[in-house]
Amino acid sequence: MQLSTKHLLGIKHLSPQDISLILSTAGQFKEVLQRSVKKVPSLRDVTIVNLFYENSTRTRISFELAEKRLSADTINFTASASSVSKGETLLDTVNNILSMKVDMVVMRHSASGAPHFLAKHIPAAIINAGDGINEHPTQALLDAFSIQEKLGSLEGKRIVLVGDIMHSRVALSNIYLLNKMGAEVMVAGPPTLIPKYISEALNVKVEYNLEKALQWCDVANVLRIQLERQNQVLFSSLREYNLAYGVSRRLLDGLKKEILIMHPGPINRGVEIDSDVADSNQSIILQQVENGVAVRMAALYLLAGKKTDQ
Amino acid sequence: MKTILDKQQLHLTLLRLAHQLLENQLSLNDVAFIGIQPRGVKVGTKLMECIGQLCPGEKLQYGILDITFYRDDVRDELHVANKTDIPFSIEGKKVILIDDVLYTGRTIRAALDAIQDFGRPQKVELCVLVDRRFNRELPIQPDYCGKAIDSIISQKVKVEWDREVVVLY
């Protein structure tokens, strides 16, 4: 058994079998991470470059750890500290790096589709670590892994994505993945942050009232307000957003059931989620981060196992 | 197709292996039995049953080990990983690796690597149901062997647990 694809550009291109394979392999890697020696020699002949054109804490550390735990050699590249500021193009930069015999590229870029462009022009395997407002596949995979770990399976589970759906690549990847795995998906937030026709285009429910949305779901995945991507005023103030769409303890206590709270990070405390919710037992935010390493190990392992046309 | 061990022979062989395993141990407290995924686990489970019957009340330490991530051919062929479960420490213990068929020796090489990541055993031994001698690619030999056979590379040896026989194709 192997993946149907050479690159991990987005969940959109994966089959349900691919997703199951990645999640089950991640389960085995999670066991590896509990051992006293948290490292396996699988990718010791592989060199991976982490190409980050956009800021990141979790994803970058998580990928780097995953690579090191697989015994791969890693190179870190930060756009701001490189020749990109001298005017080098993306393709030139990558080709120069690849000429030094690099096998895989993990890439984050603020332009949607940048990894897809690269995949057409270079022979190395590419993993998308977030491209603009398009996709963030490993985040969706680790979210799914975390839900599966807590609730047993994804099938038939009700998951609501709360907040800035319009600018969130995490939302899009999550919607694709959850739909493929048979979960029910709802998006909730202010009308200005939910794209028109999303319910027809992506087969999701839309709810503008947060309390109703939380009442409906088993899991709430709360998304960050992506101020850096908003170039117009979409709500009047952060305080007003918090009052209408912030997940608060009062709101959760009003529900007659206990739901799981997730957040892909970084958290804006007091905006989309209140501190006492983020730090409560219902929240699995830190487990998500922990699972991230295992899921990324699985993705790297399964893609490196496949020989490229090189 | 040729039957190497029929149902009764297989049962007797497992029983003999269980006796041999017991014979060599001073105390079972210091012994960790490790079945190698996927097919060594079944042999291991059967051997644990036999040993359990021979010395009832004795607590056996039995774990399972997956060696997928330690293979030397990761980049040639993709293997799906199985579960590893070693719920005890192997530090300073005598580890007995259990597999069904010993062929090239590469699986055992990977298992030797893998087991190191769980601690430093005092000693490692190998117990196999079938030994395909003359096909080895590495200097690895079993300490306990159910049946040694001569076979060529194009042949396959399979332990069929539903019929409880060992056959050579």
Image (tube, rainbow, N blue to C red):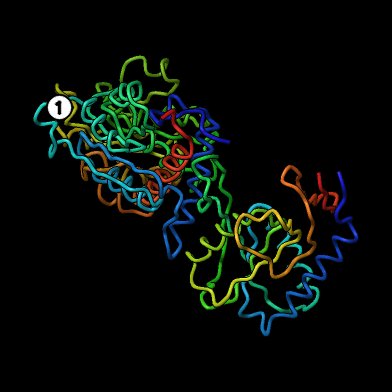
Which residue is disc 1 drawn over? Answer: A88
Q: Nearer the viewer, residue B102 or A64?
A: B102
At 85% from the left and 60% from the top, the residue drawn is: B10
Q: In which quadrant is the N terminus of chain A drawn?
A: top right
**In the picture provided, is A155 more to the left or to the right than B58?**
left
The quarter holding residue A260 reads top left
**In the picture provided, is B67 more to the left or to the right than A8?**
right
The answer to whether one can see residue B42 in this image is no
Q: In which quadrant is the C terminus of chain A drawn?
A: top left
Q: Please say if A97 is above or below B85.
A: above
Image coordinates for residue B12, horizontal then vertical, percent: 86, 66
The quarter holding residue B147 reads bottom right
Residue flagged by tag 1: what amino acid is it? Answer: Glu
Q: Residues within 10 Å of mark 1 (few under 14, many from 20)?
A: few
Q: Nearer the viewer, residue B101 or A282?
A: B101
Q: Please say if B36 is above or below A205.
A: below
Q: Nearer the viewer, residue A65 or A135?
A: A65
The quarter holding residue A115 reads top left
The answer to whether one can see residue B87 in this image is yes
Image coordinates for residue A175, horizontal then vertical, percent: 41, 28
Q: Please say if B39 is above or below B27.
A: above
Image coordinates for residue A53, horizontal then vertical, percent: 20, 33
Q: Secondary structure at mark 1?
A: loop
At 55% from the left and 50% from the top, the residue drawn is: B68
- The chain holding disc 1 is A
**In the picture provided, is A154 more to the left or to the right than A72?**
right
